[in-house]
Image: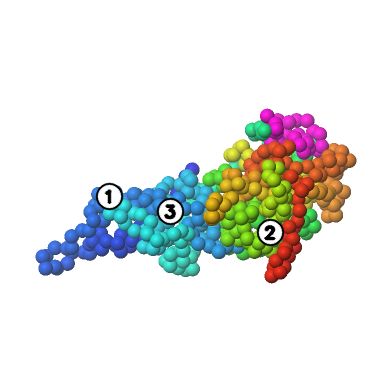
Amino acid sequence: MAAVLSPSVIEASNKARDAFLRAIDPGAFPPPPRPTVGGAPPPPGPAAKKLMSGAYYGDSFFRMISEIITRQSAVLKTGTTTENLDYAGWFNYFFTEAKKSAQPEAMGRILSVIFDLDSVLSRDNLKLVQKAGFTFPASLSTDFARMIAIDPAVVPFGVLDYLLNEGFETFPPVDAKSGGVDTGEGTVDDPKVSHVFGTDFDLQSATSTQPTDRHTTPNYLIFYRGDNRLPKMVIEHGGARCRADLAHWRKAAHVDEPWHPWKDAATSRKMWIRKGNADNDYFTVNSIGMDFHISCAYPMLRLSEIDKTLTGDIRDWTDAERARLRSSGKADFCLIQPAKGPQKEFALCDKTRVYLCAFKDDTLLSPTYTRNTYPEMGVRDVSLNQIIAWVEIERFHHNADLRKSGSARPNICYDSTTEGSTMTIVVRDWGWMNGATGAKNVLAIANPAVFENRLNSFKGSSFEINHSRLLSRNSTTYIVSTRQHAPNVWATVAPATLKK
């Protein structure tokens, strides 16, 4: 069922439209008749003439606004991240998903409410255009900021509630054993790659399409979760809880504000899926992979979230820029030999972990794979007693499209999720989740010794992936054995300890 705009948003958008038209063409809304020299009211202006036909004054006004603004990647200015989202940050997040399916008129009405239209748009004859010299993202209008402060549960809530319900959806959960799907498309090395459980890391367990147990006891299934936290931190946190259940995150991200749709516990307890990207929501779902290799793509690495000035390819950066990346503690760089290159070169790298999780086969999960044929499902929380072991990996990132052309480098930051981005992965280490979890979670493991041998043999393995699939087990962008730490040689920059 399509989302419906609240009457308060419709009323506010009508007022915004009328004010805009009146400002650009006073004749568009002639004042009530009054005595004049000729005894007649002022003649209607061009906009008013168009209004009389209904085309400009009706739905097309809002459709034109939608056409201009929905092309933007980020429409509102915000200095926040996923850890401390403000209203503008939530608007951008929900808007990105909703704009792919929402009715243009509805989106235009929303945009006319949140922006100061006079600063964003102008009129070219009878057509609305983006104002010359104006660039997005834009700021919230003064009027809308006042609504957030004075009456947040009406129009501000109505805007976000519409975008959430238009851009997101929930599914009835399914039991874990129903998640055995094979969506492999093949690779250069393999005509077919199982996306149930990667064949290179052959940990098999029962699913509806793969009924033979091998490494788990009969009632358990293995899933994988990418998480850069140290094992001791995962133990301290009690596993992996979705952020919507964390009181400190809800406060920092303003989720309990009157303008937020998730202030209602019943709504925020749902496992939401982003319709626009056909993927799990970042905050109400923990993604768990059915394929070890693809789980190595998480967490995503987006340099724009570290330093927006670090654009282009790391090989074209200055020493000071590389030093800034290292000092962030969120990623690093090294010298490494490319498989197709004459000598070692700078490469962007980071370390993270994949946690091996065992779920009872009747655990209820969100069937994300039914939306995108991607080898993952969703679960609200991963408890500590569901985590068997951790695997530490190092990732070497590459995207040839970011390389400088001539004297100019692209004004784009590396993003591991974009087309053209690939990662060479090497397995560095692994370990059991001991301590608080008891004796290696043996209830889920059919033969711990066999399991341990399998993990030991996996150390040192390397392969190539992108954000969505295994590309090759044999051919990688970089030769991982040649990795050399590139030391800080800049006296003004103190080396930082890379966060693990």
Q: Give the magenta part as a residue range.
A: 189-216
Q: CA distance from mark 3 to mark 1?
A: 22 Å
Does 198 lie within the magenta span? yes
Q: Residues within 10 Å of mark 2 (few under 14, many from 20)?
A: some
What colour scheme has been applied to the protein in the rendered image?
rainbow
Residue type highlighted by circle 1: Gly
Residue 362 shows in this picture: no
- What residue did someone put label 1 on? 54
Q: Earlier in the sequence, mark 3 or mark 1?
A: 1
Residue type highlighted by circle 3: Ile
Q: Earlier in the sequence, mark 3 or mark 2?
A: 3
- What residue did someone put label 3 on? 69
From the top left corner, tell me how far across and down residue 104 is, in percent: 41, 48
Q: CA distance from mark 3 to mark 2?
A: 33 Å
- What residue did someone put label 2 on? 330
Q: CA distance from mark 2 to mark 1?
A: 55 Å
Label 1 residue SS: loop
From the top left corner, tell me how far across and down residue 37 is, in percent: 11, 68
Q: Residue at x 31, y 57 (%)?
A: 123
- CB atoms of marks 3 and 2 within 8 Å: no
Q: Nearer the viewer, residue 370 or 486?
A: 486
Horizontal side, residue 360 vs residue 129: left or right: right
Quick check: 187 above or below 50? Answer: above
